[in-house]
Image (tube, rainbow, N blue to C red):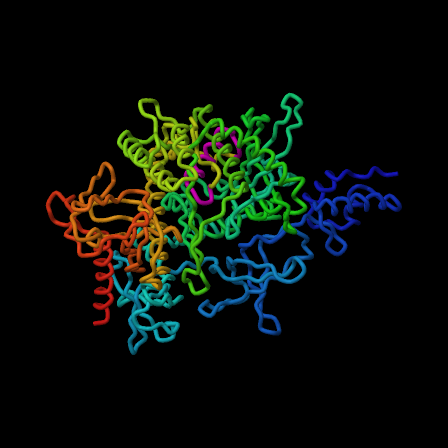
Amino acid sequence: MARIPTKEEILAWISDNPTQTSKRDIARAFGIKGADRIPLKSVLRGLEADGVLEKRRKTYRDPDRLPPVSVLEVLAPDGDGDLYARPLEWHGDADAVPRVLYIPRPAEPALGAGDRILARLTHVGLDDYTYEARLIRRIGTNPRRLLGIFRKSAEGGRIVPIDKKADREWIVQPGATQGAQDGELVEAEQAGPRARMGLPQARILARLGDPSAPRAVSLIAIHEHGIPDSFPDAVLQEADSARPAGLAGREDLRDLPLVTIDPADARDHDDAVLAHADEDPANPGGHVIWVAIADVAHYVTPGSALDREARKRGNSTYFPDRVVPMLPDRLSGDLCSLHEGVPRPCIAVRIRIDAEGEKIDHRFVRGIMRSAASLTYEEAQGAMDGSPSDRAGPLLDPVIRPLYAAYGALKAARARRQPLELDLPERRIELGEDGRVASVAFRSRFDAHRLIEECMVLANVCAAETLASKRSPLLYRVHEEPSVEKLDALRETAQAAGLTLAKGQVLQTRHLNRLLEQAAGTAEAELINLSTLRSMTQAYYSPENFSHFGLALRQYAHFTSPIRRYADLVVHRALISVHGWGDGRDGLSAEEEERIEATAKHISDTERRSMLAERDTNDRYLAAYLSERIGDEMAGRISGVTRFGLFVKLDENGADGLVPIRSLGSEFFHHDAQAQTLMGSDTGLTLGLGQVVTVKLAEAAPVTGGVILELLEVEGATMPRGPSRGARASRTGKPPRRKADKAKAKAAKIKRKVARTRR
């Protein structure tokens, strides 16, 4: 009787010979004939039952899938005129390549046989072989994009760019207007080569309607803050020419059931996790945790066009309706993304922790992995709570429960370390199909979120420790402790709320956590959490280690998100260099080492730029959402006190609005900057942080994001009515210019610009 191969030997054969996967091929490879094929068939059935192989007709193959973003080659139209395309990356059976139907949108250019496109795929049908494709862009084309106001004319029209730096207008031919109306905000692209004389031509891609409408909000923020939102041709050419990484020089991790756990709307997956009990008898009750991160450094090498553009952007920027990525879709949504069932290169760290969650050791590897599943936070939590989805159910015992067991140990270690435990709900703006705000809610926080966070923090610590021990240059994530002035302000706020923050000792996060615990469950909880957050310094990147105060960690670096953060890419390159992986071309270059301080400052600045753009966009969306509720009464809390008025955070949706000081009543109000209060000179009425108020929505300006409120009640007491005589806080005696006034002035300026273009 011939020797029957083990499961591992069969998997290795199929991996090395993906086109020879029938039972006959496998039997021939291992010299199995006649009746000996019966036990071989039993082994294959076992692999199929384990979910490691899937049977397709008379062949066995790894359960590969097409990535959600793929490069396709368009085929000739079929008899019905439909366009199909073939995927250029397919790891499965060569005789069973999936069918991909291309679904064009009205404004898209016509495609023909042989065209290559980057497309987003949706699986349709009952089998695994039928997909629909939506065009992202044609490979090799990158026409210039612009945003502007359309001005209609008998000859078609022209586009007046909203970008202040634009030096000329664009001509639109009659057939390229997409029916745009005069005064509409439009997104357009260059049409044909630029002429040597006259204005350049453009074709309109999307009508965004009123410049103050919600669909225009994020585009305006992108232009206002100077965020690059189109990739140069050389960058796209490099991305399009990239090919999937092979196994050479890498550790094969494809048998590890690593899973990604992300938000339901995630388009890319750059981290995967796995945990199991440590079998070492010297570590009873311990755990082994794997954290695998997309190997972006393999594709984005130092000094390349992709690298220069990624450094320029610094990070991805996220808006409610779109993402401005750091890397082109070919990488961020395809080759670098750890999609379910698709082999992908990674840099992984294997970490051992004891039963108390303390790290024993770790090691980094460069490998190839295949995600067992792309789970959402809700799926992972639902499985643990007794309601597993069809996808999460089979993974509950082998994958999800061990992850939660390891998280239990990490949580115990976190409790001992005492990082800052702020409790501030995260707001989520949901958009409808028309681009308008459908709802504003607060994100639910599950243990699944905390599990992933703790795994990522641990992996980041491992990266920092490894590079520091090798004396390698790296970018630390630095968070310095609060200044004395900010701490004094926080202490006074706490005292006003009847709470205490100890003084005269070296500040530690545990001291702030005690304050937060005192406030928990009280009416002052949100105020104390907000005030504590405002007392913190801004985190930044630095080649020098000043520790991370908020996380209570001595060494910390960003390693886990190289698809969306340039800092992580630099850390990956440093790890490649110190481990001697590959030929050195994708490691940390000498030039990078020399300019690492400049890189740290630059990407810290781009991070702040993105934060401001995201905040402005959210403010505008909220103002648009509230603009239909003028006159409504709402509950909130005073979240800020200035000499020109009060800021109130609304309970319902977390929006911030201004109560101008001139609307507060018929008396002078004295502003105490140190106590953060306004006090009435006649009545002694004191308005301060954290007070519960009822307000009426007086104005909401979507163009600027300004929200003006009228104060009706404070702590249940009705406010006296009548015109105010101002505030005594101004040194000059001249009322300071209010934020609302600036918002109105900005809106008026935009209207004047639009009006000028009509003349």
Say which of 560 and 210 sits in front.
Answer: 210
Task: Name the spot of residue 203 as percent of width and height, x first.
Answer: 37, 68
Where residue 546 sits, quadrant-wise, is top left
534 to the left or right of 410: left
Outermost bottom residue: 154
Q: Which residue is painted at 24% across and 62% down in the image?
A: 750
Q: Is residue 525 above or below residue 195?
A: above
Say which of 628 and 304 sits in front.
Answer: 628
Location of the C terminus (image quadrant): bottom left
Q: Which residue is painted at 53% across and 39% down in the image?
A: 452
Residue 631 in view in this figure:
yes
Q: Which residue is painted at 49% across and 49% down in the image?
A: 331
Q: Is residue 571 magenta?
A: yes
Q: In this view, does 430 lie above or below 757?
A: above
Task: Name the spot of residue 243 as percent of width and height, x first.
Answer: 54, 48
Q: Which residue is painted at 19% across and 57% down in the image?
A: 722
Task: Name the spot of residue 321 as percent of width and height, x first.
Answer: 42, 57
644 to the left or right of 734: right
Task: Name the spot of residue 446 as percent of width and height, x first.
Answer: 53, 43
Residue 145 in view in this figure:
no
The span picked out in magenta is 562-582
Where residue 418 sits, quadrant-wise, is top left
